[in-house]
Image (cartoon, helix red, strand yellow):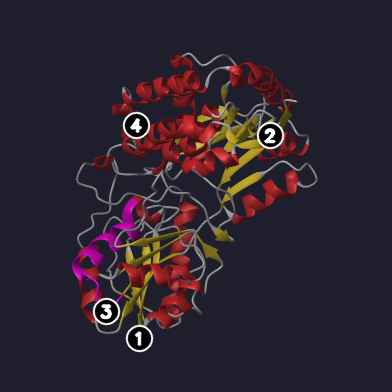
Amino acid sequence: MGKIVRCISPIDGSVYLEREALSEAAAFAAAARARAAQKDWAARPVQERVDLVLKANDYIGQTVDRMANELAHQMGRPIRYGGEFRGFNERLTYMASIAGDSLKPYLVEDSGAFKRMIKREAMGVVLVVAPWNYPYMTAINTIAPALMAGNTVILKHAAQTLKVGEHLADAFAAAGLPEGVFQNVVLDHDTTSALISQRAVNFVNFTGSVEGGKAMERAAAGTFIPVSTELGGKDPGYVRADADIGAAVETLVDGAMFNSGQCCCGIERIYVHESLYDAFVAKTVDLVKTYRLGNPLDPDTTIGPMANVRFAAEVRAQIDEAVAMGAVAHIPPSNADDGGAYLTPQVLTNVTHDMRVMRDESFGPVVGIMKVKNDDEAIALMNDCQYGLTASIWTRDPAAAEAIGDRLETGTVFMNRCDYLDPALCWTGCKDTGRGAGLSILAYQALTRPKSYHLKKA
């Protein structure tokens, strides 16, 4: 028997499900099936591919009743928030709507003498290594445009959310995709690296830790296989003096605490103009105190356990270290805080960038708040970070928000919102967040290669 991959439920620490990882030989056989199916799949008209992917979307939409319950068991999100179909559907259907225009040839000249154009050709076999925190939505970000562009896809989902990969495979099979076009596989790290290093795939999309991204790039070294990565964030919010403080508190707190803070673009640090600071902190603390920590299967629970005890341990360590260095913790321990996966959401003040909680990715329900005097100070602090995924600016002045955004080292600039992924815009990052282009027309460019045609007629 091969290696067993287990999902440990954060609800009670029990084994929720387990699967046997593929042997290296079986994994390479899966890649061979994907490669064998790819040319015929790419030869189909774009709209035919789009229609089949849309059928899979419909299938997922008909099975949402189980989604929230299964996600609660696998990664701890409270059932009151439902599943992920709304975001899944929004992203998939948008990418379907632009597929035809995004993939059509770019015509340079069509005269009596020449026809010159650039076509987009599928990369081939795309390996998607998906994370557990938004397991349907993050996976479909790449799967949908990859398939619609004419690639075949191999999905390796996180151990914490193994059922999601299986349900996606069911959906694409029910939609009628040919054998080998989409495959869900369970792999260990060594086998994943072998598929990449031996060129069994043509493109890698990875969402996860910085160390995981480095492992992917090491595996691809010398192969010239493109590796697209989203590796984390320490996303800031900045509340200017002219901000709507009520809206800012409500949205930034949700951005920091939703999904137990386990959001790629969640808010992890907030900078507030000194004129609003005291009121902002008071309102934030009052709001966070209303959160109810508990079993995610209880409809009254508003914040569930973190997905794994070790994730919660890291957040606790950051909080404890910050308090030892002088930070002030404003939220008293919840009765449901068990010292394990169930972690009291926390608001910290008197924080500095000498503290890990303001520097390292927390990926949990904690946010530090700092006072600033002006835009320049806020910009310097927001940029004082190894990550660059999103930044949220709160102001009534769009011109000021854009000017500040131009100076930020980030992939997305929000004004008066946060923690959202717009499928019409490129999802990207910089610095240790990684590199790549997800969603929007740029996803199709990333998942295809250009082929130039210079046809002389006479």
Question: Looking at the picture, does residue 373 appear above or below residue 235?
Answer: below
Q: Secondary structure at mark 3?
A: loop
- Specify the amino acid type for callout 4: Met
Tell me where residue 328 appears, x and y as whole percent: 34, 79
Region rendered in magenta: 240-258
Q: Name the quadrant of the C terminus.
A: top right
Camera-side mark, 2 or 4: 2
The residue identified by callout 4 is 67
Marks 1 and 3, how far apart at CA: 9 Å
Residue shown at 43%/48% (left/top)?
Answer: 425
- Specify the amino acid type for callout 2: Lys
Residue shown at 43%/20% (left/top)?
Answer: 51
Q: Are marks 1 and 3 in contact (CB under 8 Å)?
A: no
The residue identified by callout 2 is 451
Tell me where residue 62 appears, x and y as whole percent: 31, 22
- Specify the amino acid type for callout 3: Ala
Is residue 243 inside the magenta stretch?
yes
Marks 3 and 4, how far apart at CA: 42 Å
Camera-side mark, 2 or 1: 2
Residue shown at 34%/70% (left/top)?
Answer: 399
Left or right of 207? Residue 284 is left
Q: Are marks 2 and 4 in contact (CB under 8 Å)?
A: no
Few, some or many residues within 10 Å of mark 1 (<14, 14–19, 20+): some
Marks 3 and 2, how far apart at CA: 51 Å
Few, some or many residues within 10 Å of mark 2 (<14, 14–19, 20+): few
Residue 209 disc label: none
Q: 210 and 187: which one is in front?
A: 210
Q: Are marks 1 and 4 in contact (CB under 8 Å)?
A: no
Q: Quadrant of residue 197?
A: top right
